């Protein structure tokens, strides 16, 4: 057994131990979760966003000040998201949720604006930062879950004359209150939390693992890089979500059935 396999086994055993009387597994995912599906993260040296920084174009000031530039950025991401397919990690999460005993539940809280968890078959996913495939009007109540990609104009305008926008939380905007309340509850109530592909920089999502730790949950991080959570997580599994998650969840499934 190699060292990484050993770490995976140990993390799975500790999670199963925490769940020995049943309980909740909360999975918190960030942009790194979708990287191996071909959607680059904003941060990091990937180059795709090098023409603009997300923080400059994905703000309310940018959207209303230079809507064409903000839409150019978002439409690029919308095209990547629409073309992307869930990977083995997304599928393993959906599969595990469907095969757990009734006393163990699994819920996903994501910062991602793609729908790859749902595309893989996961249900009741909490979207903290919205859904980029949905477009809403800034002036009337128009909304479209499958707005054309690419958008027909840059920026696209509603029939009412208002500016359309992707239904995402821009930097500096508040998160949907119901989603954050539910995410907080799932962090407080879980016996085990898996944190995948998030740099733990974007608040308030970054606090969720710390809420879980304070509530006594076993916290496992899956990320190829060091994050502010790494020193505090009970286990840090260094690797990509598409390879680490399937083996972690398979080991967890075995460990749970042995309990
Ligand atoms: P982030 O701050 O959460 O950072 C990405 C993290 O993913 C980093 O810690 C990195 O080490 C890790 N990572 C990289 N490759 C990985 C892999 N293969 N497996 C697991 N982890 C991996 O995210 P960000 O890029 O700064 O984005 C900020 C916000 O922008 C997100 O919270 C989200 O709302 C939005 N965003 C969404 C998407 C999407 O929907 N797919 C993509 C980019 C950005
Ligand atoms: Zn309108």
Image (cartoon, rainbow, N blue to C red):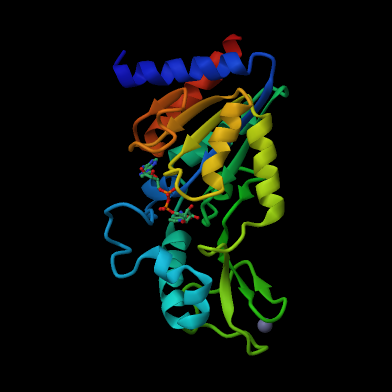
In the displayed structure image, the side of residue 148 where residue 41 appears, left or right: left
- On the rendering, which quadrant does ligand 2 occupy? bottom right
Residue at point 69%, 54% (across, down): 177
Does residue 240 appear to the left or right of 205 in the view shown? left
Image coordinates for residue 12, horizontal then vertical, percent: 49, 19
Q: Can the viewer see residue 91 in this picture?
A: yes
**Which quarter of the figure is the N terminus placed in?**
top left
Is residue 76 visible to the viewer in this orientation of the structure? no
Which residue is nearer to you in this view: 51 or 228? 228
| In this rendering, position of residue 229 left or right of residue 117 | left
**Residue 257's x, y, as percent?**
60, 14
Q: Residue at x 30, y 62 (%)?
A: 48
Q: Nearer the viewer, residue 79 or 27?
A: 27
Image quadrant holding the C terminus, namely top right
- In percent of width and height, residue 90 lies at 50, 41
Residue drawn at 65 percent across, 43 percent down: 183
* Quadrant of the rendered image containing residue 33: top left
**Residue 97 spot, x, y in % from top left:** 62, 32
Q: Could you say which is closer to the camera, residue 81 or residue 49?
A: 49
- The tally of labels here is 0
Above-or-below relation of 143 to 123: below
Position of residue 89 in the picture relative to residue 131 (left or right): left
Residue found 61% across the figure and 60% down from its top:
174
């Amino acid at each position: 057994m190699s060292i990484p396999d050993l770490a995976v086994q140990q993390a799975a055993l500790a999670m199963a131990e925490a769940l020995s009387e049943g309980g909740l597994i909360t999975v918190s995912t960030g942009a790194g979760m979708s990287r191996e599906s071909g959607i680059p993260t904003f941060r990091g040296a990937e180059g795709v966003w090098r023409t603009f920084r997300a923080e400059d174009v994905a703000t309310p000031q940018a959207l209303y000040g230079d809507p064409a530039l903000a839409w150019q950025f978002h439409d690029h991401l919308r095209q990547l998201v629409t073309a992307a397919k869930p990977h083995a990690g997304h599928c393993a999460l959906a599969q595990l949720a469907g095969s757990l005993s009734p006393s163990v539940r699994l819920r996903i809280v994501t910062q991602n604006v793609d729908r790859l968890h749902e595309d893989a078959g996961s249900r009741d996913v909490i979207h903290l930062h919205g859904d980029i495939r949905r477009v809403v009007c800034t002036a009337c109540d128009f909304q479209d879950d499958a707005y054309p990609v690419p958008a027909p104009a840059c920026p696209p305008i509603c029939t009412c004359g208002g500016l359309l926008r992707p239904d995402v939380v821009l930097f500096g905007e508040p998160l949907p209150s119901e989603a954050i309340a539910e995410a907080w509850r799932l962090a407080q109530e879980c016996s085990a939390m898996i944190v995948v592909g998030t740099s733990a920089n974007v608040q308030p999502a970054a606090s969720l693992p710390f809420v879980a730790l304070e509530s006594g949950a076993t916290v496992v991080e899956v990320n190829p890089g060091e994050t502010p959570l790494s020193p505090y997580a009970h286990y840090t599994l260094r690797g990509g979500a598409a390879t680490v998650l399937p083996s972690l969840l398979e080991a967890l499934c075995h460990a749970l059935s042995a309990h």
